[in-house]
Image (cartoon, helix red, strand yellow):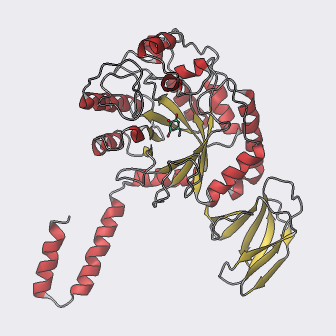
Amino acid sequence: MSRIYPGLLEDARRTVQFEPILHALVVLFVLAQGRDSVPAERLASREWYRDAKFGMFVHWGVYSLLGQGEWVMQNRPIAVSDYEWLAATFNPVKFDARAWVSLAKAAGMRYITITSRHHDGFSMFATRATRYNIVDWTPFQRDPLKELADECRRQGLKLFFYYSQLDWHHSDYWPRGSTGHNTGRPESGDWNRYLDFLDAQLTELLTNYGAVGGIWFDGMWDKPNAEWRLPQTYALIHRLQPGALIVPNHHQAPLPGEDVQTFEQDLPGANTAGFNTRTIGGLPLETSLTMNDSWGFNLTDHHYKSTRELIHYLVRAAGVGANLLLNIGPRPDGTIPPEAEERLREIGQWLATNGGAIYATRAGPIAPRSWGVTTQRGDTVFVHVLDWSDPTLALPSLGGGRWKAKSWPDGKVLQVMQAAGGVTITLPAGGETADRIVALTHR
Ligand code: FHN
């Protein structure tokens, strides 16, 4: 492009005096090209994603056996040979794809993102790229991702695969990054062969499981300056499944070819975790959150957030236009901790009544406040009052004429006082509910 357009402009300069007009047309054309370079399937997937708002994150693997979270191999540390022995005992006989997907559905979640391979390097799916996988290495011998993919299709949820680019097991993950130094691997390896291995596995994930929602990458932050061959890998993914989304958790601003900007343990724009970027691009947004303080199963971590806190997080995410990817860490036998199940069902009940002010909305016209947030769908602005005990609430001017207010979803008319500086609404009763919702529309 850049080689063609300067030439075009040169010609135009010599022949016509309409240079400003021509230049504007060229700029418009280039902008249009930029937009068109994302194919229709992916644009549609991005819109679906923006509407979905709520997904289930699942961290599940060999590490679940030890009940100390998914970083146990690094934290203890455990040598590759010992971890390989442990992996050979993994036998989650109570795993029931139907139960998991039904629970996600009951929670009001629209997609599931599951660890196909975490940093421990163990593949939780049938792969020919290594024998170190759940089918060939364990007595379980089943492919849980296949069972989940089939069940998600049956129940109408999308399935995304979390895929760790970082690996504490593979000998070709060399040179090492900031982690994985104490697992007893040789101090040598072939980086390009490692990347070929990743591409081979991604090819399987995008070929053997039907249409997948996308790939959720993690771990690039271990070696941020390495040559990850992202353009090649991203092109491979988009060639195999043109509608699949790339969701990278690299903690940077979005790179070319990516579809979603995801944040970890923080709402977009915040950085309490210490590694999230504050740069927000124009892509769909997501935030991932632990329900307790652990991603992978942690036997002693009962520090669960309350259902009310989780609903508030979901609403606050929607208020900045982001999805919430809420994590569970299933137990090594394949069952889901009861604290997690209870909360998911309660959130689902809340969404069954109030989801109309969450799903398919976009961030509302008022930036997040300490009292709550706004979302918007079409001409309706939803005011989500999360932390406010007074009977009225003053909003800044929303512009655009006069407004009327109704409580949501029961439609009771609420009093509105409108002045040049803003709109004051009388709130519905029920200050103790998780979210008092007011729907504002034009008179
Ligand atoms: O190291 C991982 C961690 O184990 C977990 O998978 C989270 C999920 O967002 N991401 C990584 C840290 O950025």
Q: How many marks?
A: 0
**Residue 15, horizontal then vertical, whole percent:** 11, 87
Give the left or right position of residue 353, taking residue 69 as reference: right
Give the left or right position of residue 63, taking residue 406 as reference: left
**Residue 424, horizontal then vertical, whole percent:** 79, 77
Vertical comparison of 124 with 312: above or below? above
Vertical comparison of 85 with 69: above or below? above
Give the left or right position of residue 22, taking residue 289 as reference: left
**Residue 338, horizontal then vertical, whole percent:** 74, 28
Image-quadrant location for residue 419 = bottom right
Vertical comparison of 50 with 1: above or below? above
The residue that appears at 75% across and 31% down in the rendered structure is 339
Q: Quadrant of the N terminus?
A: bottom left
**Residue 166, horizontal then vertical, whole percent:** 40, 32
The residue that appears at 89% across and 62% down in the rendered structure is 429
Image-quadrant location for residue 70 = top right
The residue that appears at 85% across and 75% down in the rendered structure is 415
**Which is nearer the eye, 39 or 154?**
39
**Which is nearer the eye, 300 or 354?**
300
**Which is nearer the eye, 381 or 82?**
82
